[in-house]
Image: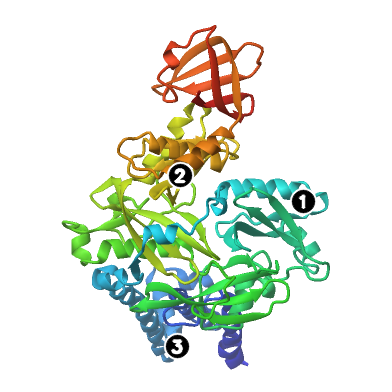
Amino acid sequence: MALFRRTILPIIIAVVIIALFYYLSIPAINVHNMQFWWFVFWSVIIVIVCLAVPRIALSGLSFFDNIRSRGALSRRRNRENRPRRHRPALIVSVIVLAALLLGMIVGSIASSTFFNARSYSKLLQVEQGDFAEDIAEISVNTVPVVDRDSAVRLGSRTIGEISDLVSQFTIDESENAYTQISYRGTPYRVSSLQYGDIIKWFNNTRQGLPGYVTVNMVTQETELVRLPEGNYMHYSTAEHFNNYLYRYVRFRYPTTMFGDAAFEIDDNGTPYWIVPTIKMRIGLFGGEDYDGMILVNACTGEMQRFSIDSTPSWCDKIFTADMVYNQLSYFGRYQSGFWNSMIGQSGVLVPSGTNLNSIVSDDDATTTETVSSSSGWGYNYLAIGDAVWMYTGMTSANSDESLVGFVLINLQTKETKWYDCAGATENSAMSSAEGQVQQMSYVATYPLLLNIADRPTYFLSLKDDAGLVKMFAFIDVQQYQIVGTGATIDEAEANYINALGSDEEVDVDLEDREEADEAVEEQPKATGTVESIQAVVLDSNTVYYFMLKGDENVYTANIGISEHLPFIEPGDKVTVHYNQNENVREVTEFL
């Protein structure tokens, strides 16, 4: 009986606690997984505690007697009642714990960039791209015009319109939600529904999640797609217990390390989860990379494992932008070794948004998808064909004021292309676009790089305070003071090409100019006599407000529109092209 209480029962309790611990933490049983090392470490402590407590109880000492460190009597009683035969087990346990800690420390140091700088720089294989050939394939009509923040706002309004769902479900707005995909040749963002809270999960989990949200990144159209009854989603990151996505996949692949899952739909609209599989390529814990993915049908739970080369073509996002962004940072920093990244920094490049003050740090670069011009760092996505590519610019480590090139990374295959392109940074382009419409206080989204009239050109959207896209802008990379804005993409592009043609240093194809002129002619036009006009200085930029006789609309014109603006007086007759923005008409050209 004493053996049972002293040994067998504590072992059973320890096994139960460790099993519960594993069920909750679900680490990969893999020596390259740091989480697994910590799991073993705490499991050893659990065993020690479970075996020690009953032995103390059976020794006849009270709890306070065993923890009291004062008094010679207590110390003597402890020595007399402590079974000497258990000292070797205690020593072995301490050695195991020390060995685990030492292994994690040594493994981390041996896998660090200090010893493996050039190996880290080779995690991303960068090829030279042809700007005119590769970027020319992109149609302006397939360029995303809304960022993630706007997509989230649009999605939340959609579910609010469906009363029978809004009371029980919400849209997943977590960091990894709203995946950007190329759906039938058009860029979309998609996100799954999730349960409103734990009570609503309990009431609805048997039926499952009834649908997902799609946001067309070009037209801004949003739809809540409802799945057929009886075929709802039963496997997701919103579930609990065995239907929780990572736990469900873990029990099938206990030794495989997983990356962040992405929600996608195939060409038929069937929802899936893409769970990337991790491979450490440098040392014990370094060089995290993906070597494949596990495809999970969100409705049926059917799963299949693929390598990167065998991935179905409709799966757009295996690699996360944060991962490839960090690998791009390693590529730029460590091509000439670790010490060069700290001293001299010869040839060191950094992605847009990297904090240059922390370039010598091994910490992951902080990134974002959508920023204002005040922060000026991040990345964006571009749909080329059926693939989604991440875009970011590259600057010199010694200066963040100019762009030296930019990179496109395929998020399915990790194919990476480098394009030489000297010019203004994304931050400068965003500031320039905001300055064109500063009277509206619009905020620029993070730009993309396009080929317009054979010129490297930034494209971005301008949002109001509500996060809705109101205008678009094209900015020349090499001369960022050349800007074209408009209420539509075609209008903004036409104004941009005309602005390029007005610059003596820029050679624009005559056919492009004629097409731009035709597009401008299609803009709304107003003719009338000036009734009143007032000049206002906004952020060191002069903007003219005027009204025409018999016209209740207010017209605004930036000083850069026409050099004749300062001389216009009440009674003068004018003809203008304009953009309609709510109750204000923005003049784009004086005729």
What is the CA distance from the residue labelled 1 to the residue labelled 2?
A: 49 Å
The residue indicated by pointer 1 is 166
Q: Residue 551 at what x, y percent from top left?
A: 65, 15
Q: Residues within 10 Å of mark 3 (few under 14, many from 20)?
A: few
Colour logic: rainbow
Residue at the top extreme? 571
Taking the image as shown, residue 252 lies to the left or right of residue 76, namely right
427 and 418: which one is in front?
418
Identify the amino acid type marked 1.
Val
Identify the amino acid type marked 2.
Asp
Q: How many marks?
A: 3
Q: Residue at x 30, y 59 (%)?
A: 361
What is the CA distance from the residue labelled 1 to the residue labelled 3?
A: 64 Å
Say what secondary structure mark 1 lies in: helix
Identify the amino acid type marked 3.
Pro
The residue indicated by pointer 3 is 83
What is the CA distance from the residue labelled 2 to the residue labelled 3?
A: 92 Å
Which of discs 2 and 3 lies nearer the camera? The answer is 2
Q: Which mark is residue 211?
A: none
Say what secondary structure mark 2 lies in: helix
- Is the residue 181 above or below the residue 247 in the image? above
Q: Quadrant of the N terminus?
A: bottom right
Say what secondary structure mark 3 lies in: loop
Answer whether labels 2 and 3 touch (C-beta < 8 Å).
no
Q: Residue 580 at what x, y percent from top left?
A: 61, 29
The residue indicated by pointer 2 is 512
